[in-house]
Amino acid sequence: MANLSFSDENPAVAATSFGGGIFDVSACEGISGGDSKWGSLGFMDLLGISQDFIAPSLFDSFQPPPPPPLPLSTSSELHRQQQLQQGHPSPASTVPESSEVLTNPTTPNSSSFSSSSNEAANDIHEPTKVEDNEEQEEDQDKTKKQLNLKPKKKKQKKQREPRFAFMTKSEVDHLDDGYRWRKYGQKAVKNSPFPRSYYRCTSAGCGVKKRVERSSDDATIVVTTYEGQHTHTYPITPRGTMGIGLDPSGFSVPQPQYFHQHQHQQQQWQPYIYNSSPSLNISTTRSTATTGLNASFPSFLRERRFNTPSSSASLLTDRGLLQDIVPTQMRKEAKEEQ
DNA sequence: CGACTTTGACCCGCGC
DNA sequence: GCGCGGGTCAAAGTCG
């Protein structure tokens, strides 16, 4: 069960500013009896929330991991944080901003890779609108939709929330990331035997969504996409005994006991995250995407360093969630190349 | 009984 | 304009 084969197969990818890979949560076997509930042990528990719980920026979270990736807290990591706190951002902080970050190891140097959020950012029709109000407006639109009272005003392109996709090697589809989710839909995925599930954060006023689908290429890999940002602290009502404190910013703060308690479990994990191309046009000036990600993306992803196996490298390049992440044109180009 | 899941229907955007 | 596929709704069912 303990699979610690941290791969150096693809150092080139791992060396990018976005280290990437797959979270191997097969360790949950024997822990979880249910399909989506892991008893008192949540995903965060299993991953062992990292000590460096405050990720100064999104990009910082995706620096290439210093080998070996575990233990989580390394001297280099601490040094880097100190640098950041002192106003000396690491080189990775120049990593382009993306509200929807997904590894695409097959095209690590693709300059055409862009996030839908960037597209969305270009589609803002009401620049004066505060982002916090966007969700409300969207809700209103939905209500109008339900009442067949479509607004007569100029058709607005639906603006998507910042999104972040990652792959997890797991036996269970819905990983417990500490937040409470309500499933509101399930759809069959084209060219995939596995359905895609849609979840919404159950907290009132929190419009964060996540989609979960299993890779058709590798049934053991779960692709999860987070969308939006939580408007509340984490976690709302933990399903399990998370033992996690909260700081005012909403970042999770693992308790020391918690950490020591689960140190052994961390070593049973193979945490990877695939990230998008380093060429993503992310800028630190667009705080919403950064904070949005930080607020919505599970801290185990925000805070960890990840390695990048070459296996499964193309899992997201063909279909499914990737369709939302890779621009249509790019997909076309990829098609033509085949 | 409340919270959550399931599932068919519906809406919308996009490509042809 | 049409069809397809993704995303969402909401009623019914399930579970603790």
Image: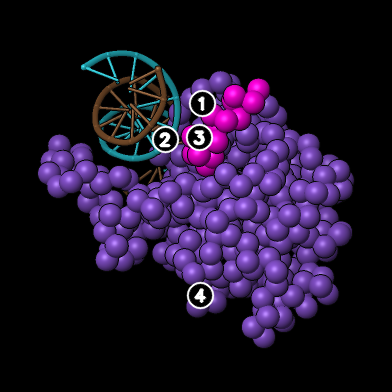
Chain colours: A purple, B brown, C cyan
Q: Nearer the viewer, residue A93 or A139?
A: A93
- Discs 1 and 4 carry the same chain letter: yes
Q: Is residue A133 left or right of residue A46?
A: left
Let me know if residue A303 appears in the view: no
- Picture disc at residue A185: 2
Mark 2 vs mark 4, CA separation in Å: 31 Å
Report the residue marked by disc 1.
A189
First in residue order: circle 2 vs circle 4? 2
Label 2: which secondary element: strand
Tell me which corner region of the image, top left, top right, bottom left or bottom right, holds residue C13.
top left
Residue at image position (45%, 61%) is A230
Q: Residues within 10 Å of mark 1 (few under 14, many from 20)?
A: some
Span colored in magenta = A324-338
Q: Nearer the viewer, residue A196 or A119?
A: A119
Q: Is residue A159 left or right of residue A329?
A: left
Mark 2 vs mark 3, CA separation in Å: 28 Å
The image position of residue A211, as x and y in percent, is 50, 41
The kind of residue on which mark 2 rests is Gly
The kind of residue on which mark 3 rests is Gln
Residue at image position (40%, 39%) is A184
